[in-house]
Image: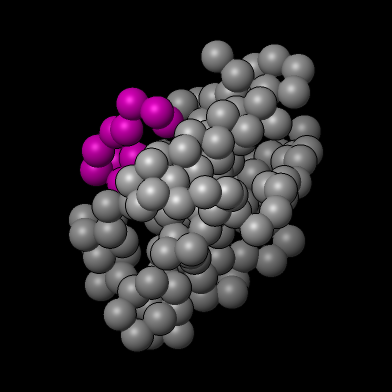
Amino acid sequence: MLVKMHAWVLMPNHFHLILEETQDDGISKFMQKLCGSMTMHFNLKYKEKGSIFQGPFKSKTVGTNRYLMHLAPYVMVKNVFELYPGGLKKASKEFNRAWKWATEEYPFSSLPEYAGMRSFPVVDPDALNMFGPAQFRILAKDMILGRARGGIQFLRFEEE
């Protein structure tokens, strides 16, 4: 196993992953295999040649629990809310309705895993076990509404 996948979301023209390396260069090897197999499938299906990606993947290292705590709802909630009918602005105004849509109707995200609705065999939620479904929803709502500044004291997370 090259990586543990903690979260994912598929967007119309890109995707986001929260991965943890389980061996040296695991993320690079995983991304090479993933993107290579996606390209091969696309080219076979559509009788095309060449890469389907514009350039190499971009990554950032998650160095603290605080960063992870904000990254998880950004990846799984903010990105999906952008696809909500009416966009992120409308989703922010209708958070409860948008949350229901994102967790029950949008099938291309690991958000339902963290909302306690269903599990995905490719997701290893261990790194994000710092909060349960109710706490994750509160964190997501605070992040979406712009209130999650400087950490979330009510959840009592500590930075490593």
User: Residue 119 location in percent, x, y?
Assistant: 29, 33
User: Residue 126 location in percent, x, y?
Assistant: 50, 26
Relative side of 149 to 126, left or right: right
Is residue 43 highlighted in magenta? no
Q: In the rendered image, is residue 39 in sight?
A: yes
Classify residue 63 by image quadrant: top right
Classify residue 122 by image quadrant: top left
Q: In the rendered image, is residue 128 in sight?
A: no
User: Residue 154 location in percent, x, y?
Assistant: 57, 53
Query: Residues in magenta?
Result: 112-123
What residue is drawn where x is 36% and y is 52%? Answer: 46
Looking at the image, is 43 positioned above or below residue 127?
below
Classify residue 74 by image quadrant: bottom right
What residue is drawn where x is 69% and y is 66%? Answer: 149
Please identify the dominant SS of the magenta region.
Answer: loop
Q: Nearer the viewer, residue 5 or 65?
A: 5
Relative side of 66 to 69, left or right: right
Relative side of 2 to 100, left or right: right
Where is the C terminus found, in terms of image quarters? top right
What residue is drawn where x is 55% and y is 65%? Answer: 143
User: Residue 17 location in percent, x, y?
Assistant: 55, 44
Looking at the image, is 124 positioned above or below residue 54?
above
Where is the N terminus found, in terms of image quarters? top right
Q: Nearer the viewer, residue 106 or 42?
A: 42
Looking at the image, is 36 positioned above or below residue 94?
above
What residue is drawn where x is 39% and y is 49%? Answer: 47
Q: Nearer the viewer, residue 4 or 25?
A: 25
Instruction: Give the farthest residue toward the left.
Output: 104
Q: Nearer the viewer, residue 103 or 134?
A: 103
